[in-house]
Image: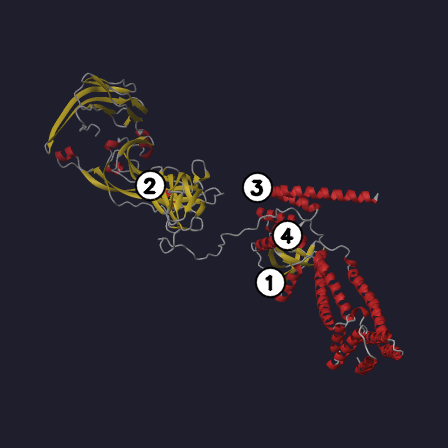
Amino acid sequence: MKKIFVICNLLLFICHWTFAQSDFDAANAAYAEGRYDEAAALYQAIIDEQPNAQVYYNLGNTRYKQGELAQAILSYERALRLRPNYPDAKYNLAFAQSKITDNIPEQDFFLSAWTRGLRNSLSEHSWLAMSISLFILGLVGILLFLLSRMLWLRKTAFHLAWVALLFSLVAGLNAGSLHRRDAQRNEAIIVQGIVNAKSAPDRSGTDLFTVHEGTKVSIRETIGEWANVRVGQNEGWIRLTCLERI
Amino acid sequence: MFLIGIALSAFADEVVFRAQAPSQVVVGRPFQLTYSVNQRSRDLRAPEFTDFDLLAGPYTSTSSSTSFVNGHRTSSFTQTYTFTLMAQRAGTFTIGPATVKVDGDNVQSNGVRIQVLPEDEQPTQQSTSQPGNSRTSSQSGSSEQVNSENIFVRTIASKTRVQEQEALMVSYKLYFANVDVAQLTNNTKLPEFTGFLKQELEQGEIQTELEHYNGRNYQTAVLYRTILYPQHSGDINIDPAKFEAVLRVQTQQRMRSIFDDFFGTYTNVTKMLTAPGVTIHVAPLPSGKPAGFSGGVGKFTLTPSISQTELQANEAVTIKLDITGAGNMKLLKTPAVDWPEGFEPYDPKVTNNFSTTTAGLSGTKSIEYLAIPRNPGDYTIPAVTFSYFDIEDKAYRTLSTPEYTIHVKRGAGASEKGEEGTVVRYTQKEDIKQLGTDIRYIDTRPMKKSAAHTVQHADLIWLWYVLPLIIAVLLLIVLRKQIQEAADINRMRYKRANKVAQKRLKAAAAAMKANQKDTFYAAIEQAAWTYLSDRLSIPTAELNKDNIAAILAQKGVNEALIAEVKNVLSTAEFARYAPTTDHAMNDLYTATTNLINNLEDQKI
């Protein structure tokens, strides 16, 4: 009985997948002919069924062609979440970001920017797999070091062990960091044309600064329908309806 | 003035028969209709004058002249038939053609169109302007004669509601009645026409025409005409214009002599005439201007042509655009030709052939684009588009040339050796030029399944680290134990090595005494091998002389001793199969005993 259930599930999944592929082809054709509204609806339907990096990327292109810059950036970001090593998505994201109004200078120290870039270059799964493999390699190294009687082997094993364990730690930290980021979803894109950030989660709060659509912000906390966001060095409260989490 | 005889310089055999009449007449005023023929004729058949009263006629008159110029004799002859007619009512009428017989052939004249103007509504006008005064205008004095009803200038705009850049004509027309205009002075002040592009119309000699205006018949003359193109939207005012006319006015001073009375006394009076200003309402061009909008407003056609589509490198190719039509042609921007990379374009040559008409500028603007391809290949020149606002349809129109495909062959000489050819081959490398930027195209590869967004069961991840660690620790413990045990065995063998060897040697000594040769050698060999195996922890399988020598050398045993070990081992091996003596057996025994003792001292 259980077997039948599993097989049914598998068949259902395959069906879904082939349907999704035909929808994908139909959407691509619509895009090629410039029917962007239709293409966007089809891509969105596939994503609702099963998120996919390629579909997000194509949806981003469609949104860009429709002139919806913020939605395009959002889609590219989501595509890169699913497949960090996606050169086309990276290129188009950078291109779309060059068209937005706000110019947020990179405030971070270059090292932290570099580490963040490194972290984002692989997916959480990849980092985790790498960390575990390196950990096992490190353990093998330790065993060899402890048990071998040959001096060169012991030396090699010792260096291998500490290097592998160090990298395993780095990879594990990256995986954890990515997991936290994706679980909390605390990065968002401004989707409203112009938003004034307030000093308090309240309409009457003083306007602190202005952000424009397409800008990436990080959400620090939310109260009711307000979110405390950080853009560069600025912090302020923005209504959640003006944002869309990546 | 319409009765001037026409001196026809036509040849005698060419019959010209023409009807002439003023184009405008007034009801109740007689006028003359003349038919003139340049040959002797007879039997005139005039048409029926249905709308006119025939007062007199036809009167026939002839005139002829002969002149010699440079020995050439030219003669002319004119026969004229004159009718005096009077119009019965206002309107526009056509008098049909007349026929006349010349040498027995019937010749037909042209028809005449006559506009009949109504009579002056003199009494009412007089009563409104000067109540109680019953003088007729012909008898009025100078002060009344030169009033603004008898002479004035009107500003006539062909349209007052126009689109931006739509042509309109503004003319200043002089109206006069019952006054004698001697001349117009040069003291004319025309407005600036700010906000317009002005294109003056050529003004020939001033011609007068009769026109019925505000219930009166006036002699009119166009003083100035210009075509205007509004340059911005909104209400644009044209300021009043000033003209100065000199009028001949009968003086009112008392007559001094009969001649004065007979000839009349006139003085010249200068009169400033002001034409009122006018406001033009200019509507802006509708939104949705096409990308290639050139600012043109009007109606245009585009005739493109290309000089050649097959040519050699470094030969010139010319694309010619003829923009023909009417509108603000002077303001047309030259459309740009997007030459492909590798073409060396030159500045386009523009030839304007315009004429100004009352409807605006019309004509042809020819633009020649010249470019020289430097590299062979097939190139496509994209369509050149020219957009304008169609003033009739009130919509933007885009005209475009076809796409031209040009095949550029390798230039002559370039295919041969460089220095012989006249054409310099470009060997300079070029970087890829960035022509524009856009997003990359969509991903059309088949969909690949994306991994789930985040790792599931993140709280159990630590197991992936702890389980290998436990396995490693267990492995360590097990392997350690085995190694320990192996080490213990070796240790035991090491310690027992000498004892075992001594036991074997004793057996060997016993065999020697008993002269059992085989047993002796076997015991000696075994003693040596077993000792070395135990002492050096070498498994029996790996035992051989070279191996032992290598390990001994590694452990720092001196060369002499190693040589001795080899010697003993080989002696024992050989002696076993060779005939030997007691003496040899004794020597070997001693050597082996010494060797074992020496190795024992080495503390290996």
Q: Position of residue B348 (x, y in %)?
A: 37, 48
Q: CA–CA distance between discs 3 and 4? A: 24 Å
Q: Position of residue B579 (x, y in %)?
A: 81, 75
Q: Residue beneath label 2, please?
A: B354
Mark 1 element type: loop
Q: CA–CA distance between discs 2 and 4? A: 57 Å
Q: CA–CA distance between discs 2 and 1? A: 60 Å
Q: Residue beneath label 4, please?
A: A74
Q: Residue beneath label 1, please?
A: A106
Image coloring type: secondary structure
Instruction: Give B345 or A139, whichever is nearer the viewer.
Output: A139
Instruction: Give A133 or B570, whichever is nearer the viewer.
Output: B570
Q: CA–CA distance between discs 1 and 4? A: 19 Å
Residue at coordinates 28% horizontally, 28% vertically from top-left?
Answer: B23
| Label 3 packing within 10 angstroms: few (<14), some (14-19), many (20+) | few
Discs 2 and 1 carry the same chain letter: no
Q: Amino acid at mark 1?
A: Glu
The tag earlier along the polypeptide, 3 or 4, is 3
Q: Chain of mark 3?
A: A
Q: Quadrant of the N terminus of chain A?
A: top right
Above or below, comparing residue B511 to residue B366 in the picture: below
Q: Quadrant of the C terminus of chain A?
A: bottom right
Q: Amino acid at mark 3?
A: Glu
Q: CA–CA distance between discs 1 and 3? A: 39 Å
Q: Chain of mark 2?
A: B
Discs 2 and 4 carry the same chain letter: no
B393 vs A111, left or right, is: left
Q: Residue beneath label 3, please?
A: A33
Above or below, comparing residue B234 to residue B579 in the picture: above
